Image (cartoon, grey):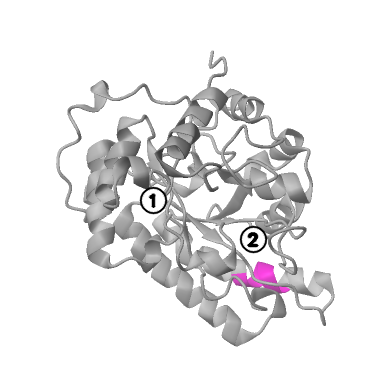
Amino acid sequence: MPDPIDRRSFVGSVASAAAVVGGAGLGGVSVAAARDRGIVTPQPDTDAAARTTAFNLAYAPHFGMFRNLAGDDLLDQLRFMGDEGFTALEDNGMAGRPVEQQEAITREMVRLGMRMGVFVVNMGTAWSPTLATGRGDARDQFLAECRAAVEVAKRVGATWMTVVPGTLDARLELDYQNANVIDALRRGAEIFEPHGLVMVLEPLNHRRDHPGLFLTRTSQAHMLCRAVDSPACKILFDAYHQQISEGNLIPNIDLAWDEIAYIQVGDNPGRKEPGTGEINYRNVFAHLHARGYTGIIGMEHGNSRPGAEGERAVIDAYRTADAFDAR
């Protein structure tokens, strides 16, 4: 997730609920599923086979990442992503886009055979004392955001949506705060579950980007998901944040595997593309592949270098990190 200051300007399947376990078998929106959701779609791209060879995993760029190479038009950016072998898109701000733009993006994604990654459910309740406090007004606002997110998800063919439970309440013991968050998430899961949708809880680092937030550790997110006990409540594991908060990435992925439904990446320090920091992403990606992960990996980071040259460097970095033995 981007920092809260950047979120509002950030430019960047229907799986059955029971299938959302351990990241394996998680699909995106198919042409048939899109039609079931009321999306009017053209025929799939018949030139797909002529594109650059696809990656081993479904890496998802965001809008703006390749603006110099693809131009300002969002649909042109999508086409460029598809031509480069990317099979998914991530757009945190999708819920705030006009309906007509959401529908146009979705039609083009279906035509290109691309899947939709996460967008953010609760922009209004993620960065203030909300779910942890147990206040009814905060919970009601969060549930209203969940209901609105269902309509966006149906429109854009999304399955997973990011939830951040807000900040800590300094006046309340942590156990009470955990109970309050669990209660609110159970109510949210009741909204999403009938639609086969999944809110993914994102632990964010407290050392650099997000001091004071309630949810910071993978183990805490795992506990919350177990307590909510719904296929509509899972974990978004962001390797950038967790490298800062706790490290030990591959063992922690394994410990939480049964509750992880979505992955995001960015190197540390700097939050740029793989290969610019300390994380061995080739090993991380190889491990995810070996475990059978077929979900989306959101490229939630900046570019280390400006201009078209920097954008090409991002693509090359993913080619390098993805060059593991996939047998």
Establish if 134 lies above or below 18.
Answer: below
In magenta, the rendered stretch is 180-184
In screen coordinates, is 134 left or right of 15?
right
Residue 125 lies in quadrant: bottom right
Dot 2: element:
helix
Q: Amino acid at mark 1?
A: Phe
Residue at x 33%, y 58% (from the top left corner): 154
Counting from the top left corner in percent of width and height, residue 106 is at: 27, 51
Q: Which residue is mark 1?
A: 63
Q: Cα distance, mark 1 to mark 2?
A: 33 Å
Question: Residue 17: percent from the left, percent from the top?
Answer: 48, 49
Label of residue 42 in the image: none
Other residues around mark 1 within 10 Å, as few (<14) / some (14–19) / many (≥20): many
- 313 up-or-down from 208: above or below: above
Mark 2: amino acid: Val
- The x, y position of residue 47, in whole percent, is 19, 27
Residue depicted at x 42% and y 51%: 159
The mark nearer the N terminus, 1 or 2, is: 1
Q: Is residue 124 above or below residue 237?
A: below
Q: Is residue 158 left or right of residue 227?
A: left
Q: Which residue is mark 2?
A: 228
